[in-house]
């Protein structure tokens, strides 16, 4: 009967039947009713008590308790609980998904709530950033906000997590490069394994240049300038932007100086094609002083990256 009342949204009437606070299921159902009624302060109070006693209903109680904290704007406590639960050796799959989703939502709400009154570098703590980097599937908006903020924090506090992230083939290639640039800026001197597009690299930030300070950037750009800047300034700008994106994508891959012209020709062709501009590959051979087969191979290599 009680569960039927709850299902019909008759929370107040259901509470009249839920008075045995020594019963575990009663404690949980009271939380459902209180949150349904918008009595979040009361749900928080009872939720803290129920969480400490829960056994069979533990994860359901934690879910309701977190919801109450979220609605009250008590984001720090909710995040601490989620981090603790998600770091456990075992958690039922359905609750892991639920808690991961709740974690992302609460971080976003916390960011929105604090953005107007605090500076950007106060939105996430180093522990929250560490947790985001450790997640299997992370909201991309949160990920890039966290990496952006990490520039203002001491990256050495989470070096083990960053090392795992860089070596993990499932992590996003662009985010890896942003992390590497932070390591360079903060002059970290440690060898790290980096995996990108099936290739492995040894990376030490202490002697690596930033992405756009590589010789390849100006070298490839010079070929594009000579070919396009006066003939088609708009296409040149698009090619320059794509070159920068590619260098961030493939970093820390080194590009041989002898291949700068081939990269430029492939970028010219690829961007022109995206813009529905007809380009004759044989003309690019002459324009960039390189072999047609080499251009075609490089075009295939560039297609590993999806804009």
Image (tube, rainbow, N blue to C red):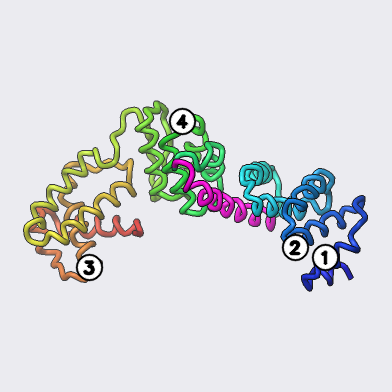
Q: Earlier in the sequence, mark 1 or mark 2?
A: 1
Q: Residue at x 27, y 41 (%)?
A: 254
Q: Earlier in the sequence, mark 4 or mark 3?
A: 4
Residue 65 % position (x, y)? 73, 51
Q: Are marks 4 and 2 in contact (CB under 8 Å)?
A: no
Q: Earlier in the sequence, mark 3 or mark 2?
A: 2
The residues bearing labels 4 and 2 have C-alpha atoms spaced at a distance of 43 Å
Q: Are marks 1 and 2 in contact (CB under 8 Å)?
A: yes
List the residue tagged with mark 3. Answer: 275
- Numbered mark located on residue 12 in the image: 1
Task: Classify residue 236 as left or right of residue 306.
Answer: left
The residues bearing labels 1 and 2 have C-alpha atoms spaced at a distance of 8 Å
Which span is picked out in magenta? 93-119
- Numbered mark located on residue 154 in the image: 4
Q: Residue at x 82, y 58 (%)?
A: 30
Residue, far front: 117
List the residue tagged with mark 2. Answer: 37
The residues bearing labels 3 and 1 have C-alpha atoms spaced at a distance of 62 Å
Residue 266 in view here = no
Comparing labels 3 and 2, the label whose residue is closer to the camera? 2
């Amino acid at each position: 009967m009680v569960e039927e009342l709850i299902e019909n949204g008759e929370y107040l009437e259901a509470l009249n039947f839920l008075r045995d606070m020594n019963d575990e299921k009663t404690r949980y159902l009271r939380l459902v009713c209180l949150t349904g009624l918008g009595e979040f302060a009361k749900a928080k109070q009872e939720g803290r008590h129920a969480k400490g006693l829960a056994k069979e209903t533990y994860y359901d109680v934690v879910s309701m308790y977190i919801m109450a904290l979220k609605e009250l704007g008590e984001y720090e406590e909710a995040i601490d609980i989620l981090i603790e639960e998600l770091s456990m050796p075992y958690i039922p799959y359905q609750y892991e998904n639920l808690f991961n989703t709740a974690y992302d939502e609460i971080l976003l709400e916390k960011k929105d709530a604090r953005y107007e009154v605090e500076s950007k570098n106060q939105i996430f703590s180093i522990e929250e950033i560490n947790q985001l980097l450790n997640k299997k599937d992370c909201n991309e908006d949160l990920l890039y906000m966290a990496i952006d903020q990490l520039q203002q924090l001491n990256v050495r506090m989470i070096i083990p997590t960053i090392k795992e992230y860089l070596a993990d083939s499932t992590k996003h290639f662009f985010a890896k490069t942003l992390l590497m640039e932070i390591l360079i800026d903060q002059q970290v001197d440690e060898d790290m394994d980096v995996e990108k597009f099936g290739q492995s690299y040894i990376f030490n930030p202490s002697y690596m240049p930033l992405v756009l300070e590589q010789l390849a950037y100006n070298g490839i750009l010079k070929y594009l300038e000579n070919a396009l800047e006066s003939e088609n300034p708009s296409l040149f700008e698009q090619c320059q932007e794509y070159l920068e994106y590619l260098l961030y994508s493939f970093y820390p891959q080194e590009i041989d100086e002898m291949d700068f012209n081939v990269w430029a020709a492939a970028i010219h062709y690829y961007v022109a094609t995206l813009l529905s501009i007809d380009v004759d590959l044989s003309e690019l051979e002459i324009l960039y002083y390189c072999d047609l087969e080499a251009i075609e191979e490089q075009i295939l290599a560039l297609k590993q990256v999806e804009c």
